[in-house]
Amino acid sequence: MTAVVRYVARRILLTIPVLLGVATLVFSLIHLVPGDPAQSMLGEGASAADVADLRQRLGLDRPLLEQYGRFMGGLARGDLGTSFRTNQPVTAAIRERVPATVELALAAMVVALPLGIIAAVRRGTFADYTAMTVALAGISIPNFWLGPMLAILFSVSLGWLPVSGRGGWESLILPAVSLGAALAAILARMTRASLLEELRELYVRAARARGVTRTRAVLRHAMRNSLIPLVTILGLQFGAVLTGAVITETIFAWPGVGRLLIQSINFRDYPLIQGCILLIAMTYVTVNLLTDLVYGVLDPRIRYE
């Protein structure tokens, strides 16, 4: 068994107690929050008998430990249960929303990366100062304020872009900018610092002396060697992107996992809440594992022992 395989197997085994802890914590917290799913589904005017009957059919009248045991048993089989609200399997409901969230997260990262490259290549110029100013604004402005302001300006006032929903590429611009602004602030500064350090190295000057164009020297030589700190930041910030997507998707009515989570919380849909949060936790752990593995690809000197 190679060192990489042993490393991956060890990390996967360590992931299991983390996910079990997340599942237990989520189950405990959502059952402590005031509110009755049966009452929410039937409305305030429902009779006590109807509410009691629905609670029995949903299994909410059983002891909490029994409900927890059934939940963990289903989780061990890969069954996250059935949505209270739609009567749809949780895995199917989440599977429908994942592509939209992945699309938004990738678009947010695309928004974030170019600023740092521009600032490094055009150091000391107007482009550099502009990029750093935008980065500073991005980290200073929360996305729950930036999102509505962008919608008011570019959708309501100017009418240039759709205000909500998922349609063509135009509908992706405002959510991606809103979500990627804070990430851009961190990533741009890190990209600029790391790339500037590499651009001073002799191998870049040697490449330029051999007739390599500036763009090729930056993208093919300097950029590759500056990627390790950037990959670290991307891995750490991906969880923040997913968390921020909850707010951004709600603001722009983007049909992703974040909006599904908010809707599930409003309706006290316990199985769907648990499924969404488990997906976010699993994604965060998986991305961090992949980040560690990418180190070995970028720098062959790194070994997994």
Image (tube, helix red, strand yellow):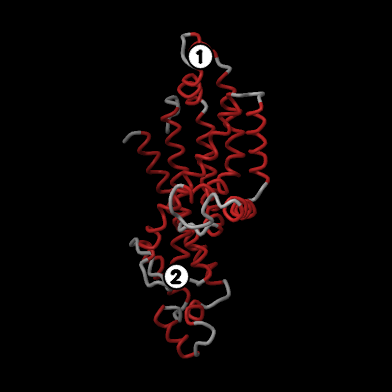
Q: Name which residue lies at 37% across and 39% down.
A: 6
Q: Nearer the viewer, residue 14 or 230?
A: 230
Residue 84: x, y in percent?
Answer: 42, 73
Closer to us: mark 1 or mark 2? 1
Few, some or many residues within 10 Å of mark 1 (<14, 14–19, 20+): some
Q: Amino acid at mark 1?
A: Tyr
Q: Nearer the viewer, residue 161 or 7?
A: 161
Q: How many marks?
A: 2
Element type where label 1 sits in the image: helix
Q: Which mark is residue 68?
A: 2
Relative to 120, is 261 above or below? below
Q: Name which residue lies at 50% across and 72% down.
A: 267
The image quadrant where one finds the N terminus is top left
Residue 141: x, y in percent?
Answer: 66, 48
Q: Name which residue lies at 60% across and 39% down.
A: 186
Q: Name which residue lies at 60% across and 24% down.
A: 122
Q: CA distance from mark 1 to mark 2?
A: 59 Å
Relative to 290, is 116 above or below? above
* Rendered image quadrant of residue 98: bottom left
Few, some or many residues within 10 Å of mark 2 (<14, 14–19, 20+): some
| Residue of label 1 | 203
The image quadrant where one finds the C terminus is top left
Q: Which mark is residue 267?
A: none
Q: Report the side of 275 relative to 123 (left or right).
A: left
Residue 114: x, y in percent?
Answer: 54, 33
Q: Amino acid at mark 2?
A: Tyr
Q: Nearer the viewer, residue 51 or 293?
A: 51
